[in-house]
Image (cartoon, grey):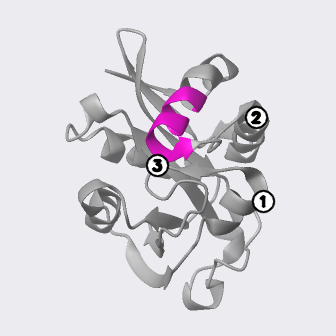
Amino acid sequence: MDIKELAPEHYDAVIALGNLVHGDNYLDLESIKLIHQKSIKDNINASFIATENNQLLGFRLTYAPLNWQVDQWCSSELWQVPLDKTCYFKCNTVAEAARGKGIGGLLLAESVRAVKKQGGVAGASHIWMQSPGNSAFRYFTKAGGELIKIHPDRWLPDSLEHGYVCTLCGNECHCDAAEMLLKF
Protein backbone atom coordinates (compact mmCIF):
# COMPACT_ATOMS: atom_id res chain seq x y z
CA MET A 1 0.00 0.00 0.00
CA ASP A 2 1.18 3.52 -0.83
CA ILE A 3 0.24 6.72 0.97
CA LYS A 4 0.74 9.87 -1.09
CA GLU A 5 -0.11 13.54 -0.85
CA LEU A 6 -3.36 14.49 -2.55
CA ALA A 7 -2.65 15.84 -6.04
CA PRO A 8 -4.83 16.98 -8.97
CA GLU A 9 -4.43 13.62 -10.74
CA HIS A 10 -6.30 12.01 -7.80
CA TYR A 11 -9.34 14.30 -7.93
CA ASP A 12 -11.63 12.12 -10.07
CA ALA A 13 -11.07 9.01 -7.95
CA VAL A 14 -11.45 10.94 -4.68
CA ILE A 15 -14.70 12.53 -5.87
CA ALA A 16 -16.07 9.14 -6.95
CA LEU A 17 -15.18 7.39 -3.67
CA GLY A 18 -16.38 10.32 -1.55
CA ASN A 19 -19.75 10.41 -3.28
CA LEU A 20 -20.09 6.63 -3.09
CA VAL A 21 -19.41 6.50 0.65
CA HIS A 22 -20.95 9.79 1.83
CA GLY A 23 -23.65 10.44 -0.77
CA ASP A 24 -24.20 12.23 -4.05
CA ASN A 25 -22.82 15.76 -4.29
CA TYR A 26 -20.60 15.33 -1.24
CA LEU A 27 -17.63 16.28 -3.44
CA ASP A 28 -17.28 17.80 -6.90
CA LEU A 29 -14.39 19.20 -8.88
CA GLU A 30 -14.81 22.73 -7.51
CA SER A 31 -14.97 21.56 -3.88
CA ILE A 32 -11.98 19.19 -4.11
CA LYS A 33 -9.86 21.93 -5.68
CA LEU A 34 -10.77 24.28 -2.82
CA ILE A 35 -10.15 21.59 -0.19
CA HIS A 36 -6.76 20.86 -1.74
CA GLN A 37 -5.83 24.56 -1.63
CA LYS A 38 -6.88 24.74 2.02
CA SER A 39 -4.71 21.69 2.77
CA ILE A 40 -1.48 23.44 1.88
CA LYS A 41 0.45 25.82 4.12
CA ASP A 42 4.16 26.61 3.84
CA ASN A 43 4.31 24.23 0.84
CA ILE A 44 3.22 21.35 3.11
CA ASN A 45 0.14 19.36 2.08
CA ALA A 46 -2.00 17.90 4.90
CA SER A 47 -4.32 15.79 2.68
CA PHE A 48 -3.42 12.24 1.68
CA ILE A 49 -4.61 9.23 -0.30
CA ALA A 50 -3.96 5.51 0.11
CA THR A 51 -3.62 3.33 -2.99
CA GLU A 52 -2.75 -0.23 -3.86
CA ASN A 53 -2.08 -1.35 -7.43
CA ASN A 54 -3.19 2.11 -8.62
CA GLN A 55 -6.57 1.61 -6.91
CA LEU A 56 -7.78 4.26 -4.45
CA LEU A 57 -8.39 2.65 -1.05
CA GLY A 58 -9.09 5.80 0.92
CA PHE A 59 -8.33 9.44 1.56
CA ARG A 60 -7.97 11.97 4.39
CA LEU A 61 -8.82 15.61 3.61
CA THR A 62 -7.44 18.13 6.09
CA TYR A 63 -7.49 21.93 6.14
CA ALA A 64 -4.25 23.51 7.37
CA PRO A 65 -4.30 25.84 10.39
CA LEU A 66 -5.51 29.33 9.40
CA ASN A 67 -6.90 27.98 6.08
CA TRP A 68 -10.45 27.44 7.30
CA GLN A 69 -13.20 29.36 9.09
CA VAL A 70 -14.77 28.47 12.41
CA ASP A 71 -18.53 28.36 11.85
CA GLN A 72 -21.75 27.84 13.83
CA TRP A 73 -20.95 24.11 14.13
CA CYS A 74 -17.72 24.82 16.02
CA SER A 75 -17.58 25.32 19.79
CA SER A 76 -14.05 26.72 19.70
CA GLU A 77 -14.42 28.32 23.11
CA LEU A 78 -14.41 24.76 24.53
CA TRP A 79 -11.31 23.56 22.65
CA GLN A 80 -8.65 25.11 24.89
CA VAL A 81 -6.17 25.32 22.00
CA PRO A 82 -5.15 28.32 19.87
CA LEU A 83 -7.35 28.63 16.78
CA ASP A 84 -4.38 29.65 14.65
CA LYS A 85 -2.73 26.32 15.47
CA THR A 86 -5.80 24.14 14.86
CA CYS A 87 -6.40 22.29 11.61
CA TYR A 88 -9.76 20.94 10.46
CA PHE A 89 -10.10 17.26 9.62
CA LYS A 90 -12.67 17.54 6.80
CA CYS A 91 -13.16 13.84 6.18
CA ASN A 92 -11.63 10.41 6.26
CA THR A 93 -13.02 7.96 3.72
CA VAL A 94 -12.10 4.33 3.13
CA ALA A 95 -13.55 2.07 0.42
CA GLU A 96 -15.80 -0.63 1.85
CA ALA A 97 -13.53 -3.48 0.70
CA ALA A 98 -10.52 -1.87 2.42
CA ARG A 99 -12.10 -1.15 5.82
CA GLY A 100 -10.78 -2.72 8.99
CA LYS A 101 -7.16 -2.71 7.80
CA GLY A 102 -5.99 0.40 9.64
CA ILE A 103 -5.96 2.64 6.56
CA GLY A 104 -7.91 5.41 8.27
CA GLY A 105 -5.41 5.51 11.11
CA LEU A 106 -2.45 5.60 8.74
CA LEU A 107 -3.98 8.48 6.78
CA LEU A 108 -4.73 10.37 10.00
CA ALA A 109 -1.13 9.87 11.20
CA GLU A 110 0.19 11.33 7.92
CA SER A 111 -2.09 14.34 8.22
CA VAL A 112 -1.05 14.91 11.83
CA ARG A 113 2.65 14.77 10.84
CA ALA A 114 2.04 17.33 8.10
CA VAL A 115 -0.04 19.63 10.33
CA LYS A 116 2.68 19.58 12.99
CA LYS A 117 5.13 20.78 10.32
CA GLN A 118 2.60 23.52 9.48
CA GLY A 119 2.72 24.62 13.13
CA GLY A 120 -0.47 22.90 14.28
CA VAL A 121 -1.07 21.45 17.73
CA ALA A 122 -4.63 20.14 17.34
CA GLY A 123 -7.35 19.27 14.86
CA ALA A 124 -11.10 19.74 15.03
CA SER A 125 -13.57 17.53 13.20
CA HIS A 126 -17.25 16.71 12.85
CA ILE A 127 -17.61 12.95 13.01
CA TRP A 128 -20.54 11.24 11.29
CA MET A 129 -22.41 9.51 14.14
CA GLN A 130 -24.50 7.37 11.78
CA SER A 131 -21.48 5.78 10.09
CA PRO A 132 -21.82 1.98 9.82
CA GLY A 133 -21.46 0.59 13.35
CA ASN A 134 -20.54 4.12 14.46
CA SER A 135 -17.05 3.26 13.23
CA ALA A 136 -16.09 6.89 12.58
CA PHE A 137 -16.63 7.88 16.21
CA ARG A 138 -14.87 4.76 17.52
CA TYR A 139 -11.89 5.31 15.19
CA PHE A 140 -11.47 8.99 16.08
CA THR A 141 -11.88 8.28 19.81
CA LYS A 142 -9.26 5.52 19.60
CA ALA A 143 -6.91 8.02 17.91
CA GLY A 144 -7.27 10.31 20.94
CA GLY A 145 -10.15 12.50 19.82
CA GLU A 146 -12.13 14.16 22.59
CA LEU A 147 -15.91 14.68 22.28
CA ILE A 148 -16.81 18.37 22.50
CA LYS A 149 -20.49 18.46 21.50
CA ILE A 150 -23.15 16.62 19.45
CA HIS A 151 -24.70 18.64 16.62
CA PRO A 152 -28.05 17.30 15.34
CA ASP A 153 -28.81 17.85 11.64
CA ARG A 154 -25.22 18.96 10.94
CA TRP A 155 -25.45 18.32 7.19
CA LEU A 156 -29.08 19.42 6.67
CA PRO A 157 -28.01 22.81 5.24
CA ASP A 158 -25.75 21.00 2.74
CA SER A 159 -28.78 18.95 1.64
CA LEU A 160 -31.14 21.88 1.33
CA GLU A 161 -28.72 24.45 -0.11
CA HIS A 162 -26.18 22.42 -2.08
CA GLY A 163 -28.00 19.26 -3.21
CA TYR A 164 -26.12 16.85 -0.93
CA VAL A 165 -27.88 13.47 -0.90
CA CYS A 166 -27.10 11.52 2.28
CA THR A 167 -26.65 7.76 1.86
CA LEU A 168 -28.99 7.23 4.82
CA CYS A 169 -31.45 10.14 4.79
CA GLY A 170 -31.67 11.06 1.12
CA ASN A 171 -32.31 14.69 0.18
CA GLU A 172 -32.81 15.88 3.78
CA CYS A 173 -29.89 14.78 5.94
CA HIS A 174 -30.73 14.54 9.64
CA CYS A 175 -27.52 12.81 10.69
CA ASP A 176 -25.74 13.93 13.84
CA ALA A 177 -22.15 15.11 14.03
CA ALA A 178 -19.87 14.67 16.99
CA GLU A 179 -17.68 17.76 17.22
CA MET A 180 -14.34 16.36 18.32
CA LEU A 181 -10.88 17.67 19.00
CA LEU A 182 -7.61 15.77 18.64
CA LYS A 183 -4.63 17.35 20.39
CA PHE A 184 -1.11 16.37 19.31
Label 1 sits on what residue type?
Glu
Q: Is residue 161 above or below residue 48?
A: below
Give the mark, 2 or 1, whose residue is nearer the N terminus.
2
- Quadrant showing the C terminus: bottom left
Rounded to the nearest angstrom, the CA distance separating label 3 from label 2 is 23 Å
Q: Which residue is mark 1?
A: 161
- Quadrant showing the N terminus: top left
Label 2 sits on what residue type?
Lys
| Quarter residue 10 falls in | top right
Q: Which residue is mark 2?
A: 33
| Quarter residue 90 falls in | bottom right
Foreground of the two, 50 or 18: 18
Q: Which mark is residue 167?
A: 3
Q: Which residues are magenta?
A: 15-23
Residue 156 as seen in the image, left or right of residue 105: right
Rounded to the nearest angstrom, the CA distance separating label 2 from label 1 is 20 Å
Residue depicted at 42% across the width and 10% down the height: 54
Foreground of the two, 101 or 182: 101
For the image, the number of numbered tags is 3
Q: Is residue 110 visible?
A: no
**Secondary structure beneath label 2:** helix
Q: Are marks 3 and 1 in contact (CB under 8 Å)?
A: no
Label 3 sits on what residue type?
Thr
